[in-house]
Image (cartoon, rainbow, N blue to C red):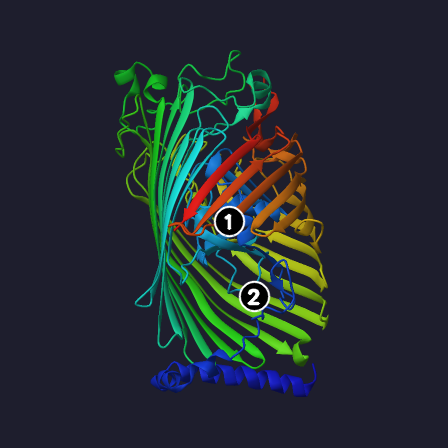
Amino acid sequence: MNSQSKRKVNHTIFLALTILIFDVSAQANTLTRNTPAQKIKKSVYVGEVSKKAKEVDGVPMNSTYASSYIGKRAIKLASPVTSPQELLNRRPGIVATAGGPLGVRQHIRFRGFSDGAFTEEFDGVPLNNAFTGYSVSRANRIPITINNISGVKIYDGVNNPSVSGPQSLGGTINYLPKKPTKNFYVSGGLGYGSFDTFLWNATVNTGSLYGLQSYLSYNRQTSNGWVANSQTQNSNYYYAGLIPYDHGQGKISLYAIVNRNIANKPRSIAASLIAQYGYDYSYPPSLRSDLYKDTKLTAILDDKNIVNQYLSTNFKFYVKNNIESELEYHNPDFQQSPQYPYVYKNLYFSDYDLYEKGAPTYDPKALFGSVANGTDYRYAPTVTTTVGFIPQFILTLPDNVITVGAQTYFAKQHDGEFYYGNANVPQISGYNDTYDEHDTRIFASPYIQDDIRLFNGLLHVTPGIKYIFSHITTSEDIGYEYPLGENLTASSNTSFVAPSVGINLHPWQPLSFYFAWGKNVRVPYAAETYDAIQKNKAGEYVVAPIHLQPEYVNDYEFGTRFHYAHAQLSVKLYRENLTNIFNSVRNPITGLSIEINNGNELAQGIELGARYTFGHILLGSWQGYANYSLNTRKYEYTTSYDVPGESVDGSNYSTINVGLNWNWGSLQANLNGRYVSARRLHNYITGRIGKLTVPAYFLLDLGMNDRIKLHNTFAKSVDLSLTLDNLLNRQYFAYGYANKDYYHQYYLDGEVGMPRAVFGTVTVRF
């Protein structure tokens, strides 16, 4: 860049900061009231794209980062038992599976990263648990359903600070809320399908009442699931409200979701048992059962305001509350043995000596005859509350958009684990608990970024930097794992500076290239902050020391977008170097296992995408699409469990998506095929990658929808939807890991995916 260009950029940034200071004063408010609305609307943001501008995968050609978009059409044509996470399977590098309908026992991988190493958001508000990092669950912690969303934005890798979440190593996924419209309508729907799945819904869209627009919906779904003894029921309440102010320059929105799920969790089953007893086999309740109950509240108050032609603001206040519980039953006679060789030996039962450490005081032998009979029920409740504030200031200039903002929240959690001899499990610390834990976390991440337009749009540069601070405190009441006394407390502070920069070169209207680099961290969570009480070599119980720094990643992204006539092409390359990986090591001198930063990891891959609009052919219009990804990871141990350093390849997989979209009048259809390659399994005991694999699979899904307009009737229209999932009726494992049987041989333990399923719905709009 020549000196004249440098002076221009420096002058622009200086002018922007000066305007930011003065425009938040009372004079700025006066200017806003006196500025004609038409003049303000003419202000153009650098990152804003007109409807005529070219995009690829719903992303502007001049974007400096790797990202993509899933729109309303995919949601409309999805199966009614699909979770929002399973919608992501249409994008390369993402594999989302569930052991039951609606996301029960959900698993998701994003570029090889598992849940907890990337952020999921609703309207920019993190859905991830503040203490575990998880947003979706291997159980049934369901924060949102597809009935609550209008689209999904997917930001790959670290990305820029304004969209990158608290633990965005793999990326950030933002689910966009469904919003009210100006036209009044009421609708009701019924649906039925495979696995005795029944659903009904009711919606009211009020239109504008004294300026307030409201959208209210209730969705109820029940299903027996495709695995025996895995019934689930889900109730979803949703409200979206919008009211303008300040002559339309401001807008206040309110989103509130309450989702309640009750489910018998599908169990992981050995592949040989499925082959012997059938694809839908699961342990009978007399041997093993898990009843999950979960109620999640998410409420967001969002205030957007155009202060003047230069400055706009956005303030989000949110509250999340989660009340969940698990009641697990394990028959005392159902232990690993020649009769049950594939049952993993559960130490909480026959081998769990509750009195070795002097706590808790519960005596299962006295009440139920044996330790095994007195610990056959496990109850684990958790209550988590998070309150957050997300401010943002956007300063728009002819060649710059400067964004200043922050992510902040305060969270509290109380969870425990209690054992007893029947289903009425007491919850008494120091009596029948293994642990009873209280956690708090304070998180703050301010940032500033700039979107600079140079050489008449030929070049875009988006530098940014954010500061991450986290304070977590964990307090343990007396219990089996913590018998040394009450209120054992540990705390951890983490801070990190995360810079990033993106560059986009747009030399020709149909073609652009981008490069991005950034750093981010995954801060320690509660389980990594406070290790269990352990016995040292002298036979004494002590608290194992914790010396943790955050895990952090250097992310490099390169890609190109091409959009000419009816064709769209994209290529993405990425490389992520992770260091300071959290790991457990055993000190041979003290005999203690402690959490330390130990090992490095390399994640890299390539993603290709193509889309072509054929237009009208014979009957209706057609569009085809395809994408491919190859994602690889290599983990390098320094030392672990007294094993010398080694390099382990794992979590390597590829995905292929192909599909057709078809429109004929109001009739819409989508045929989508998805291939997921074989994946090597993690060892259930050691956590390492083993030799066993989850076999590859190919699925074919069909979705159709038609809106029939009615005349001279009270009803306005009828929507008919039909979905056929897994048309080819493939039998496959959606998720799996390596386990060890009674004879010390490793075997595939996993969850089967949904077989062929048909669902139909009818929705009447009044």
- Residue found at the far front of this picture: 712
**Label 2 neighbourhood size at 10 Å, few (<14), some (14-19), many (20+)?**
many
Residue 214 visible: yes
Could you tell me if residue 103 is visible in this image? Answer: no
Q: Please identify the residue farthest to the top as the structure is shown.
A: 339
Q: Pinpoint residue 354: horizontal percent, then vertical percent.
A: 34, 25
* Vertical comparison of 758 with 447: above or below: above
Q: Nearer the viewer, mark 2 or mark 1?
A: 1
Residue 43 image point, x, y percent: 51, 79
Find out whether the residues at labels 2 and 1 contact each other: C-beta distance under 8 Å: no
> Which residue sits at x=59%, y=31%?
733
The tag earlier along the polypeptide, 2 or 1, is 2
Amino acid type indicated by mark 1: Arg
Give the answer, above or below, for where 499 lies relative to 731.
Answer: below
The spot of residue 628 in percent (x, y) is 70, 48
What secondary structure is found at the residue carrying circle 1? strand
What residue is pinned by disc 2? 499
Q: What residue is drawn where x is 30% and y is 39%? A: 477
Instruction: Judge by depth and name the residue closer to the eye, 319 or 410.
Output: 319
Name the residue beneath numbered marker 1: 707
Q: Amino acid at mark 2?
A: Pro
Under circle 2, the secondary element is strand
Distance in Å between CA atoms under marks 2 and 1:
49 Å
48 or 498, nearer to the observer = 48
> Which is more toward the observer, 594 or 737?
737
Q: Quadrant of residue 410?
A: bottom left
Up-down relation of residue 78 to residue 387 (above or below): above
